[in-house]
Image (tube, grey):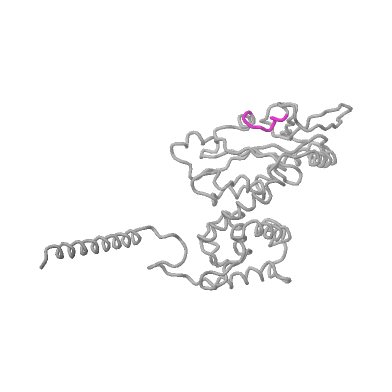
Amino acid sequence: MDPIKIMDLIEDDNEILASLSTSIALVIRRMNAKPKRGGSTMGRREIYRNRLQGDHMLYNDYFSENPTYPDYLFRRRFRMQRPLYLKIVEAVSQEDDYFIQKRDAAGRLGFSPLQKITAAFRLLAYGCSADSIDEYLRISESTALESLKHFCSALVKVYAEEYLRSPNENDIAKILAVSEKRGFPGMMGSLDCMHWGWKNCPVADHGQYSGKEKEPTVILEAVATHNLWIWHAFFGLPGTLNDINVLDRSPIFQQCQDGVNPSFQYTVNGNIYNIGYYLTNGIYPKYATLMQSISNPQGKKIDIMRRCRKLIEKMLNARSVCYKHATLSSASPAAYGNTQIYVSL
């Protein structure tokens, strides 16, 4: 046989082997690669949850014309009235099409907006695990957590301009009018701090974040008005600090220092003042802008002051479950903007 033909056959065989080796290598690489989440995978059982049944049950229990559970139970379990909840559902669904009910690749209807947003609300309101809501809402753990992330992001985008801001002149006028009716002309709200337990704090940072609570905490300073609007929130300082240390680092009086604070006037005992003040507890310094509460209140007037001062504690306690159970993240106390969600809700 001609040696040249033999060499050509050998080269052809080498090319075929090289091509085959490349194809096999690609197949092996794909087999070893970590599959992306989504759809069924080999060796993994698909659970038929009957998501439509969960949607119908949720609707009949809370959102039908004659719901199973009355309004007071809706208020307890969703932490708000039904009209406000439906308003949030509509706004969030318009902002993020993730919540719009769609069909999957098999043509089956996906989760409804009520299911996804209710899952997010249950995680925020109760601080429960994502797996615990599967039995009622028929929604998997991964989908519940994904719904929570989308809900938090959409909620901040929708309501940031309305709530995550300092009060303007119209807001200040309304706040001062209500404060004057309650017997405190010039009061801008109640100021206080709360410590949020940081369960997953790195061991190396325990000393920096462990204060009087004997466990790692992160501090939130907030100002709340009579209607529990949190228009000032300063978050992230370590738990070893106290309220005074936080106030020294807080930007709450920055406008006063810059001379650009909103102008208004009010009269107390015949004296005219143009700077508002905040109700605080006894640990705060005696500034002109801070009014401390009385430790042993006696008399009707002092008792009114104590009840107004309790507004900030009521607000912090009402929303503390959002922080107590770190459902938003196991790694960082500020992940997914949970402070913004805390303030918006």
Q: Is residue 5 left or right of residue 26?
A: left
Q: Is residue 83 left or right of residue 7?
A: right
- Residue at horizontal 50%, vertical 72%? 48
- Residue at horizontal 77%, vertical 39%? 168
Q: How many marks?
A: 0
| Position of residue 176 measured from the top left corner of the image (x, y, whole percent) | 82, 38
Q: Is residue 338 left or right of residue 301?
A: left
Q: Give residue 45's quadrant in the image.
A: bottom left
101 or 233, which is in the foreground?
101
Tell me if residue 136 can be seen: no
111 or 211, which is in the foreground?
111
189 or 141, which is in the foreground?
141
Q: Is residue 248 left or right of residue 19?
A: right
Asked whether 251 falls inside the magenta stretch, the response is yes
Question: From which residue to which does the magenta span run?
Answer: 248-255
| Position of residue 291 measured from the top left corner of the image (x, y, whole percent) | 74, 31
Relative to 148, does residue 198 appear above or below in the rendering?
above
| Image quarter (top left, top right, bottom left or bottom right) of the N terminus | bottom left
Q: Give residue 194's quadrant in the image.
A: top right
Q: Residue furthest left?
A: 1
- Residue at horizontal 66%, vertical 30%? 283
| Position of residue 52 measured from the top left corner of the image (x, y, whole percent) | 58, 72
201 or 158, which is in the foreground?
158
Q: Give residue 187's quadrant in the image.
A: top right
| Position of residue 97 measured from the top left corner of the image (x, y, whole percent) | 61, 60
Tell me if residue 123 can be seen: yes
Asked whether 323 falls inside the magenta stretch, the response is no
Relative to 5, does residue 340 appear above or below in the rendering?
above
